[in-house]
Image (tube, rainbow, N blue to C red):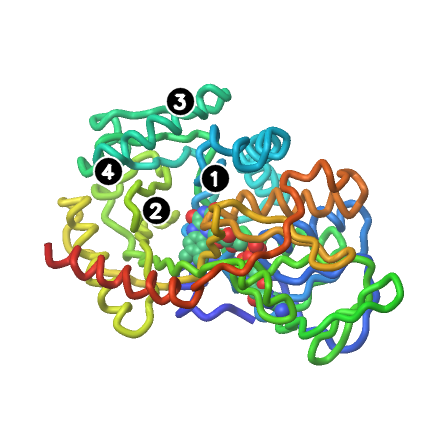
Amino acid sequence: MLNDPRSHGLWEKTAPAAPQTTSLKGDLSADVVIVGGGFTGLSSALHLAERGAKVAVLEAVEIGFGGSGRNVGLVNAGMWVMPDDLPGVLGEDYGGRLLRLLGNAPDLVFELIGKHGIACEAVRTGTLHCGVGAAGVKELEQRAEQWARRGAPVHLLNAEETAKKVGSTAYAASLLDLRAGTIQPLGYVRGLARAAIEAGAQIFTGTPVVATEREGQRWSVKTPEGSVSADWIVVATNAYTKAPWPEVRAELVHLPYFNFATKPLSENIRAFILPERQGAWDTKEILSSFRFDVQGRLVFGSVGALRGTGTAVHRIWARRALARIFPDIGEVEFEAGWYGKIGMTADSLPKFHRLAPNVIGFSGYNGRGIAPGTVFGQVLARHISGEIAEADLPLPVTDPQEQRFRTLREAYYEAGSQIAHLAGTII
Ligand SMILES: Cc1cc2nc3c(=O)[nH]c(=O)nc-3n(C[C@H](O)[C@H](O)[C@H](O)COP(=O)(O)OP(=O)(O)OC[C@H]3O[C@@H](n4cnc5c(N)ncnc54)[C@H](O)[C@@H]3O)c2cc1C
């Protein structure tokens, strides 16, 4: 089964086919049940299966149905939170550990792509965080200094250097991060699924988990037409969580984010926009991102949902914004548009939860889940296999905290992005 091109846009059109899977019918026994077929769940499945565990992945819809099949494809290092601020927020131990883990996280993504031959248009020429205005430049200067002090290969580029790398004079500076890169995200998540199956994991799609029951020391995980009995449950449902863990969803505010993909651009336009093929985004509060796919389509995104009036508002804005950033781009035609829900936490940091005995998971990646989901999946596998004690995990165990005025804030983001983009098309 495929995802719908209307929901997964360009990535559904160009990703290699998903491995054959079916829904679960009947009862099964495993060591670990993983709920959710995105980066976190499938990395966890792959690394557990490689360690000899019997693994069953249960995915409500299809591999990559959630954020993993809809994102921009920027394989970022680190987080939104400034490196120097992390120890203050999480304490020295966790702060240092999380920084090291997520600072190096793109390594694991590109290593897995190489090791398993995953066809996902991987390009590792870095990312460009582009500075807008004095505040944007200041943020980049601080990030550059703090990462460079830690030995990371980051470079602060001035306006002229940025113009050459981006192909636009719209930015006052940029931060080139050579740890990072871009992928075709649906191709990557399907590749993880294939690698997990080859390592021995079973994956069931069209199989929502509807309930769980404790049976002695084990869990019985119920689906509409079957069940799996297991010692452990990994909850890897993040922003697309459905029952039976509503608390994971309640901790997140959904931020809608859309992408439009142009038709392949002409050779000469491709030669001056992002000539080295970095992925880019800017420092604005309602940020924009842009990157190429392998066929020379420019994928351009920003905050907002492509539904109702949003579809037309954001489409018109995207055309004009592209013309503003790249005045020579000419008339562009979009061949795909799609959007997804980003799960934002109150402090912009991911969370580790133990929802019940032996029921664990990471969530809340704040729009940075490719590399973190991949490494957290590996961490879960190592923890379940007894290689890492709970005290040595990269995040402390916290109880999910429902965010206040969640529905109101989600409506505000959706409407606010339309107002901002409408204003942006008029000014
Ligand atoms: C538009 C957009 C752009 C983004 N851009 C970037 C980017 O450029 N770089 C980056 O690093 N990150 C980005 N992100 C974030 C990133 O995509 C996510 O953080 C990441 O995909 C989360 O992976 P996951 O495996 O934890 O969850 P998901 O990929 O969301 O997977 C969760 C899965 O759980 C399933 N599920 C839910 N409930 C149940 C249930 N009860 N039973 C069975 N299955 C269930 C869902 O169907 C879903 O497939 C972006 C996100 C979006 C939406």
Report the disc number at residue 132: 4
Mark 4 packing: few (<14 Cα in 10 Å), some, or many (20+)?
some
Q: CA distance from mark 4 to mark 1?
A: 19 Å
Nearer the observer: mark 2 or 1; the answer is 1
Q: CA distance from mark 2 to mark 3?
A: 28 Å
Report the disc number at residue 292: 2
Mark 1 packing: few (<14 Cα in 10 Å), some, or many (20+)?
many
Residue 284 in the image, given as x and y percentages of width and height? 28, 44
Badge 3 vs badge 1, beta-carbon distance below 8 Å:
no
Q: Is residue 73 visible?
A: no
Mark 4 or 3 closer to N-term?
A: 4
Report the disc number at residue 145: 3
Amino acid type, mark 3: Glu
Task: Identify the residue under disc 1.
Answer: 79
Amino acid type, mark 2: Phe
- Between 278 and 211, the one nearer to me in the picture: 211
Amino acid type, mark 1: Met
Rendered position, 245 above or below 186 = below
